[in-house]
Amino acid sequence: MKSFLTGATGFLGSHVARVLSEQGADLRLLVRPTSNLKNLEGLKAETATGDLRDAASLEKAMSGCEVVFHVAADYRLWVRDPAEMYRSNVEGTRAILEAARNNKVRSVVYTSSVATMGFTGNGRPADEDSPVSLADMIGHYKRSKFMAEQIALEAGRNGMRVVTVNPTTPIGEQDIKPTPTGRIVVDFLKGKFPAYVETGLNLVDVRECALGHVAALEKGKTGERYILGGENLTLKQILDKLGAISGLPSPKIKLPYFVAYAAGLVDQTVSGRWLGREPRATVETVRMGKKKMWASSDKAARELGWKTVPADNALRRAVEWFRANAYA
């Protein structure tokens, strides 16, 4: 099976690539000229140079492939030029699907995000049927992923075989950037987490999430989406687990919402607008935190054979990897 994969140099994509390789797939990986290839070390795969924002490069790179895993995305909670994020996440997805159509690709697995789900303030886990619209999306990352997901779902309902997966919050090793979730772990290890806010996340083991992508290819229904999730935890529970794993103290002070909002506003202004670097906190991340991003993977369990596992092992591997690679 000749498999074309975007995002293999990143966190989740590198794990998808390794799972496919272990299962005997013939891999072709899309890389940019500036990509950090660290996560590809030791991986038997062909590379093709291209960019999500260059449609011609995608069509050429995908030639001869049977299946496509589109995992790549611009995943940042703050960006100086929002148009750049929409070009990658929305127009890039459109270009991938068009290239797949032109190359007569058999199946596409599109990696969306749990961020596109309909979360409420009551803590009830969201699922694929929770009411949601573009107006519910807070921030450019969520908006761009929601718009891209609509393109993928429409393609899947109009002749192409496109299956959408919605990972919750992957955690584990090889988070080289790191992602916003990885930065929680790094900041904790550096002692930069003196307090916490009342919020919640669903943590999924990145290795399990990669296996879920392959299950979606084999068993998923076209035009459908599947939440690939793990354990629903409050931020405090996550920090307590990190404390038990690392031997470092977990914060005991809970910040009121208005204090967190003010801190996000200051950091966004100073770090983002004045210094031109990504803030550790923004107004939008604080606003998102008012809703616990808890989710149910029951549909994936029924249709894909998905099994939910606790987050402890993945958190431990993340801590060990970040320490071994001098992030903390």
Image (tube, helix red, strand yellow):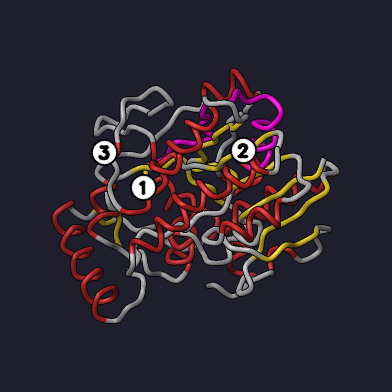
| In the foreground, 212 or 156 | 156
Measured along the vertical axis of the image, is residue 165 above or below residue 260?
Answer: above
Say what amino acid the circle numbered 2 marks.
Val
* Residue 12 within the segment the image draws in magenta: no
Element marked by disc 2: strand
Measured along the vertical axis of the image, is residue 304 above or below residue 241?
Answer: above
| In the foreground, 213 or 194 | 213
Magenta residues, start to end: 210-233
Crowding at dot 1, Cα within 10 Å, few <14 / some 14-19 / many 20+, comes out as many
The residue depicted at 59 percent of the width and 23 percent of the height is 301
Whether the residues at callouts 1 and 3 have beta carbons within 8 Å, the answer is no
Crowding at dot 3, Cα within 10 Å, few <14 / some 14-19 / many 20+, comes out as some
Q: Position of residue 251 (x, y in %)?
A: 34, 58
Question: Extreme bottom residue here?
Answer: 275
- The residue under label 2 is 109
Element marked by disc 1: helix
| In the foreground, 110 or 325 | 110
Q: CA distance from mark 1 to mark 3?
A: 9 Å
Say what amino acid the circle numbered 3 marks.
Asp
Point out which mark residue 142 bears: 1
- The residue under label 3 is 136
Image quadrant holding the N terminus, namely top right
**Side of 97 where 237 appears, left or right:** left
Mark 1 and mark 3 lie on one chain; the one further toward the N terminus is 3
